[in-house]
Image (spheres, coloured by chain):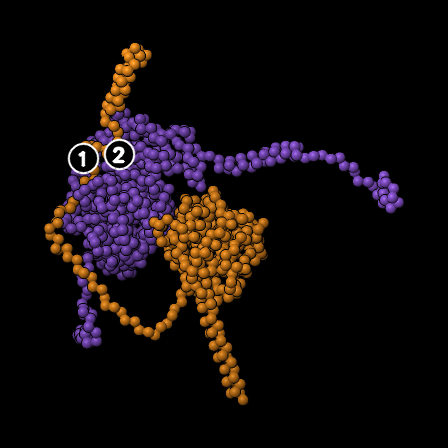
Chain colours: A purple, B orange
Amino acid sequence: MRWEETVVEEATADKEDTSAPETVVQSSVPQPKDDFQEELVIRPLHSGDIYASFQFRTLWETDFMRGNKVSHYRLFPKSLGQVISKFSVRELHISFTQGYWRTMQWGQPFLPSPPGAELWVWFQDSVTDVDGTWKELTNVLSGIFCASLNFIDSTNTVQPSASFKPLGIGNVTDHRFLRYATLPREIVCTENLTPWKKLLPCGSKAGLAVLLKSEKLFHSSFHSQAVHIRPVCQDWQCKTTSWELRQTLNVVFDLHTPGQGKLEWSLFKMFSRTLTEACPLASSSKIYIDITDDPQGEQFEVSPATHLLSQAMVLGDRRTFSVYDLTQQITFGTVRSLNLLIRWKSSEDMLRPLLHAERYVAGYGLQTGEIHTLMYNNHPYRSFPVLLLDSVPWYLRLYIHTLTVTSKGKDNKPSYIHYQPSKDRVRPHLLEMLVQLPPNSVTEVTVQFERALLKWTEYTPDPNHGFYVGSSVISSLVPSIVAMDTNSTREQPLFSSFFPCKEESSYFMRVYTEPLLVNLPTPDFSMPYNVICLTCTVVAVGYGSLYNLLTRSFQIEEPSPGLAKRIANIIRKMRGVPPL
Amino acid sequence: MKILTLLSLLATHLSASSVNIEENAGQFFSSGHTNNWAVLVCTSRFWFNYRHVANTLSVYRSVKRLGIPDSHIVLMLADDMACNHRNPKPATVFSHKNMELNVYGDDVEVDYRGYEVTVENFLRVLTGRLPPSTPRSKRLLSDDRSNILIYLTGHGGNGFLKFQDSEEISNVELADAFEQMWQKRRYNELLFIIDTCQGASMYERFYSPNLMALASSQVGEDSLSHQPDLAIGVHLMDRYTFYLLEFLEDIHPSSKANMNDLFKVCPKSQCVSTPGHRTDLFLRDPGSALITDFFGSVRKVEITMETINLTEPIQQVEQNFVNEERQKETYSYVDQLPVSEIIHQKPKQKDWHPPDGFILGLWTLILLVFFKTYGMKHLKHIF
């Protein structure tokens, strides 16, 4: 009561002193709504490793493309907001990955990513010079993420004609506004994690982000961090849009690294931290643990136990999860900290993933070679289409007339091929094919190539390491085991709502192959120095000798006389007699 | 009598301390700089040059600890040691054996890394001649009141420093770059530290004013590395920078240590090589230049008694989304793999090709005209 009175007094006092148009107590004009959610999904893998996937999502009902500039940022990071409005970006997906996802041992990831850095961007229709805007955008992003993204230029950028359709809402897809580039050589380390963490509303101080400690995250088999920005529907009617920013971090911890053989994992073992609170700015903060393989509790146990269960349709399968809600104080118990312990006993064979791909270079020598891409369809009776995107640098000259696609020994003609030949030092090869994979088969795509000789200034400082060829991207609609949920706006956990789902019987998936490491014929860089030394020596010795022989005149000189003779000559000179 | 002596002692003590305060205040305002920048460069690639990266990161750590923020530090590392696959402890770079001190830390921002560390990029950063789309974190945005610390480490020789095993920068180029900086008024005072073999040769050619230089060895001498770590398998630090790090660990932001103390770091007994320094181009007395003038970022605070009237808060105009009823189209998500649409999609041809049969028709016309004029008897020579 007394508090209310003082507030009223202050308000009246203010009114007497100054003529403020608004009172002090009333809040200002309503801001566009923004919302932040965070979640962590932990999935024990059959090989004994453990897969942890963080997702942080910020939704903001604002319009960057309208005339008046956005100036008040709350949960959405300002650096990314300025990037979106300055470069008229419709969608932006950037990922940094260290390691390669082993599909046959680990299953499918929630969000796939290729090794190195990958960036693909859809620009708005209003952009006139897409290439120039792309170059500026990569430079700005290299500053934001402390990565060498400025090496993305026309020699490694492609414009896919059918892959990488926008993941956000939009009615028009003109592929002239799409650009895709990968840097397979890019290293991911703490210097990339630091600015990534700074984009989160709570930073790394509260919520799930306290678990992101670099010394543990990079001591793993697979580490991938990504930023995805796209417009999404606000509600089921989908008449208005809001901007969604998702920051995802996937990591697979190796069973054998911490030096233990038991199948026992805890948050402290994985991240060397425990959780004490949720991010205060988050509307939802949850941990999901995948217990589908063992609902009765025979195979593995989770402690502290929870009664919250949830089911979600993800990757074509209905999975059951134990849920820990960090916004409830009761989750942390009496010790005020949450350290989940997961222990499991034995592992039976895992269901084989339906789609899997490999790629390798065959051949010998430094002149020619052959790229083989293998795609496995492990479904027993259904066939499905895949779209293969290959971007090969210009210094591997592909012979497209040797392109063969075979399944089960027979020729498999693709129903759509788009090939853009490379131009030396300007653009890479782009090959896109739509292939129907027959059930339970291996489809092999082979193409021969020849290695080009680069100019000696174009070699990297360590050319004997080899040159990288980016991963192939295989996008496909895979038949799902259970009916997928096409209602996109029901409350779904974040990990199951990334790819939009249009039909019930199949779901969209992307698989990346390994990048290739190819040796180009490397010159001996010490040879210019050797040649200069040798030539100069030969010229100096040869020309010098010849010059001396030609221009020197020889005179006969008498040897100098001894001492006695010299004294005698002096006496003779004094006497005036000619010398000896 | 006793009271008088006591009073006189007190008076002298007070006057001495007031003189001290005046001296301190005088020292505080003597340097004339208002902001601090640091450019820290490691020029070596490959795992066995771990120590050069550790050198640069230890200076980075000291400089951050003494107050220079990341936005004022340009850190260039030519290779990645922390997440290198040969590193037994990923995401760490140690400077002391037995893994005592991780100089990489948890909060590091590297501006130029890997292949970006070239002589051209280094000189562009110094002179400010960068392409317009370069982000701010990669620029040296210094002005004429900035004190800049430049630290270089790597492999060097008499008059040159090797960048990434493929190119060199010579001492003449470096001196000319500093002269460009002076002409463009890009620094107030500059401290140049170099830790390479024969490092003193790199500062022999300087000729711009307000430069002070330190090197880890004289011409003809090699700089040696400090100690290996048997678990990591490489030498962790170079001697000069190791003892420099130990010296800087004792400095705190309000320290009064000056440059003469810095010149004494790593005598010949510890370093085996003879560190050198050059102060003839520096206009102030080195004894009056504090360590924190270059390694720290001391902000000057002015206290004012004037009152400032704040303007009224800016009212944000409420954006009426409700008014735009007319343009309410329903949006939807795009089909990710529309198979039928893709199959019927014709790839757009960018290059213009002449219509089909054009070349054939052209040749027919040429042949017809030829045989018309010269007669049909030539036909048998063609077929």
Tell me where residue B24 appears, x and y as whole percent: 47, 71
Can marks 2 and 1 be said to lie on one chain? Answer: yes
Task: Give the residue type that dot 1 points to.
Answer: Glu
A409 left or right, relative to B272: left
In the image, residue A409 sits, relative to residue B187, either above or below, namely above
Look at 43% across and 44% down and name the residue there: B86
Q: Residues within 10 Å of mark 2 (few under 14, many from 20)?
A: few
Look at 21% across and 46% down and name the residue there: A168
Q: Residues within 10 Å of mark 1 (few under 14, many from 20)?
A: few
Quarter of the image where one finds residue B32: bottom left
Q: Which chain is disc 2 placed on? A: B
Q: Quadrant of the C terminus of chain B?
A: top left
Q: Which chain is disc 1 placed on? A: B
In the image, residue A477 sits, relative to residue B32, either above or below, namely above
Task: Give the residue type that dot 2 points to.
Answer: Lys
Look at 26% across and 31% down and name the residue there: B352
Mark with earlier residue (2, 1): 1
Q: Quadrant of the N terminus of chain B?
A: bottom right
Tell me where residue A41 appears, x and y as whole percent: 26, 49
Look at 38% across and 70% down and name the residue there: B302
Q: Nearer the viewer, residue B360 or A339?
A: B360
Tell me where residue B363 appears, x and y as whole percent: 27, 20
Residue beneath disc 2? B350
